[in-house]
Amino acid sequence: MRTKLPWIFTILLAIALVVVLVARPSSKPSAASTTSVGAKKVLYWIDAMNPTHKFDKAGKAPDGMDLVPVYDEAGSQATQPSAQKKILYWVDPMHPAYRSDKPGIAPDCGMKLVPVYEDGGGAATSTVSGYANVKLTAERRQLIGVQTGMTEMRSLGRLVRTVGRVTADETRLYKITTKFDGYIEKLYVNVTGQEIRKGQPLFSVYSPDLLSTQQDYLLAMRAAKQAPSLLAAARQRLLLWDITPAEIRELERTGTARKSVTINSPTNGYVINKIAVDGARVTAGEPLFEIANLDRLWIQADVYEAELQFIRLGAPTTTTLSHIPGRTWTGRVTFIAPTVDPMTRTVKVRTELDNADGAVKPDMFADVVIQQPERRVIVVPDSAVLQTGTRSVVFVVRDDGTFEPREIAVGTKEDEFYEVRSGLAANEKVVTQANFLIDSESRLKSALAQMKP
């Protein structure tokens, strides 16, 4: 029994030695602990959950995770034969104002600093404040989908479509009155809306004053040789009371003063208002009839104040009415109201149409198209124009492939083009697609250039 105990202790000691040797960490450094992996050099290690914590060697983070190596990207790129651009500095991608002379981790967001290369494409200055010229390789243009278009000379005009209301021509409205007091003896026209012709009798009126003046004229005729001035004065009084020369000659022929005088229509048209009644007393200047000549009518169109800039006096117009399909009236803008309707924010624009056949009636609604006169101007595709709110910017493509930002002044827009009032010439190439991406890079490049010491 005593002879077996030393062998048992020997076996247990050997087992313990094997366990110690197996559990002992290897003296050979791991790949993570080396200062270089392949061609990349390890600068330091960081905590993946808290990148602001840097460590000089590999190991475990306080939270128990393995530290992550940060490699020298610039050193590896410098060993590549294809790296031709020089790195100027590194910036925080979230805050480009932060710059560093060497790569690393941004202090605020924990992201990798991004290198800024020397373009080697010449000066990056621009005439537009806040922008810089941008030069892209052909591969990068294709990647972001750059497309271009051309400025050109084009005949530009604009159609303003609106609704109008038909009204009577105010220059063809007549009010029938007398210049003397009297009494209506007989009405020849006594229905509102009746059509009348020029020279047609309207009513006859008895006036004591007119009768007395006729008698004075006859007396002056008999004494014309002794007092010719009395005859001229009496004749003038009759004329001022709208007694026609033909009626005066009839008075001279008959030698008898007429009790009543007939008042005739001064125009063709329609009676739109009748006040005269048989036997009614007439006061000088009191309206008895209102007559409208409807051979020519007005269209009062409502144009919104935003479209008023496209309306000019003399602009051609086209008028159609829904209840008369297939018929079109052409005309021109004859008047633009000097005031804006405060309720509808519109301006009255007047055009005229011929209505000899009487097909159009006052107070009808009409569709009016006003044509802005065409003019030859420089235009640019609307997709090329970036509206910043205070200015309009386009990117012009130079012969060397540089994208030059340029501020322009735009005018009216028609179809897919803007009128260019200044800033561009004809036959210039401009960016029409991906210009937002070029705009962002141009602004960033300008901001970085301003921060250089």
Image (tube, helix red, strand yellow):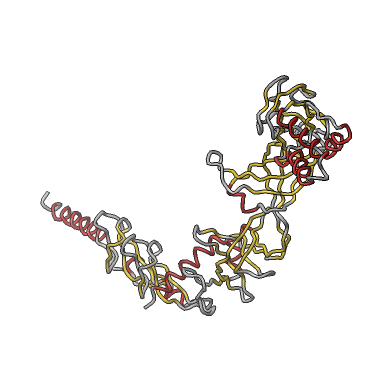
**Residue at x-position 72% and y-position 61%:** 375
The answer to which of 320 and 158 lies nearer the viewer is: 320
Residue at (22%, 55%) from the top-left corner? 15
Counting labels gives 0
270 versus 69 height, above or below: above
Whether residue 267 appears in this view of the structure is no
- Tell which of 325 and 244 is nearer to you: 244
Name the residue at the front extreme. Answer: 226
Residue extending furthest right? 253
Tell which residue pokes out farthest to the left in this image. Answer: 2
Q: Quadrant of residue 247?
A: top right
Provide residue 276's location: percent of width, then percent of height: 70, 24
In the rendered image, residue 159, in percent from the top left (x then y), is placed at 70, 49
Q: Is residue 299 visible?
A: yes
Question: What residue appears at the point 77 percent right and 21 percent down from the top-left corner?
Answer: 186
Nearest the eye: 98 or 337: 337
Image point (73%, 60%), residue name: 155
Relative to 164, is 88 above or below? below
**Whether residue 148 is situated above or below residue 302 in the rendered picture:** below
Res 434 → quadrant: bottom right
Q: Is residue 251 left or right of residue 438?
A: right
From the top left corner, tell me how far across and down residue 387 is, in percent: 54, 58
Quarter placement of the C terminus = bottom left
Give the camera-side residue of 142 and 309. Answer: 309
* Image coordinates for residue 162, horizontal then vertical, percent: 67, 42
Left or right of residue 359, residue 183 in this image: left
